[in-house]
Amino acid sequence: MGAKAIFCRGASSLIKRVASQTSTLDSGLGCRAYSVHVRRNTRALTTGELAAQAAVSQETIRFYEREGLISAPPRTDSGYRQYPVETVARVRFILRAKDLGFALKEVRELLSLRLDADTCRTDVRRQASDKIRDLEERIRDLQGMRSRLRALERACLDRGTTEECPILKALHTEDKPE
């Protein structure tokens, strides 16, 4: 839908940029009349539409809602959830945070930091630093597991019975693994 608007000197740069892409009529008084096409995307999304746009399953959407990562939306008279369009960005934020190794509890904290006006970058950086330390510890643990498994693999020859297999023996032993 097109709407005619008049903008005078001092209009925001965003309005000027949008207006510069439309037809103008200069009144000669420092004001211009612009024909601006306003596109409002106020349509709500169903669970399926939200899931498709965020590239997750519908169950993931419902799980995030149960976990409080996304707000419970209003429902239609027939019970369909009606998510605001902005929820797509929130779900994508959650997915990107998870891809970086953040657990859901940590994602919830990041979301709250993002919305808290008193939060500074130091708070967010501290979360990232904590996660890096956690990841480095997990990497060391995984490297140790790989090293122990490689040693067992080298000890296991391709011939013989499974009774004599060093891997199976090591897994069966009562002692705590090193």
Image (cartoon, grey):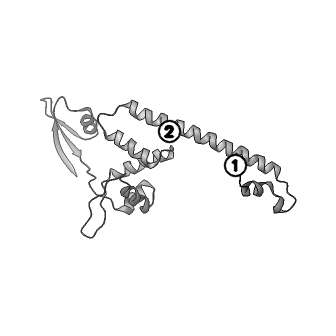
Tell me which amino acid carries mark 2.
Answer: Lys
Report the front residue among 30 and 70. 70
Quadrant for residue 147, please give it.
top right
Disc 1 on helix, strand or loop? Answer: loop
| 155 lies left or right of 131 | right
Disc 2 on helix, strand or loop? Answer: helix
Relative image position of residue 173 (x, y in whole percent): 73, 55
**Residue at image coords 82%, 62%:** 163
User: Which mark is on residue 6?
Assistant: none
Quadrant for residue 127, please give it.
top left
Report the front residue among 155 and 78. 155
Tell me which amino acid carries mark 1.
Answer: Pro
Report the front residue among 31 and 80. 80
**Residue at image coords 24%, 41%:** 23
Give the answer, above or below, for where 104 lies relative to 45: above
User: Which mark is on residue 177?
Assistant: 1
Quadrant for residue 74, please give it.
bottom left
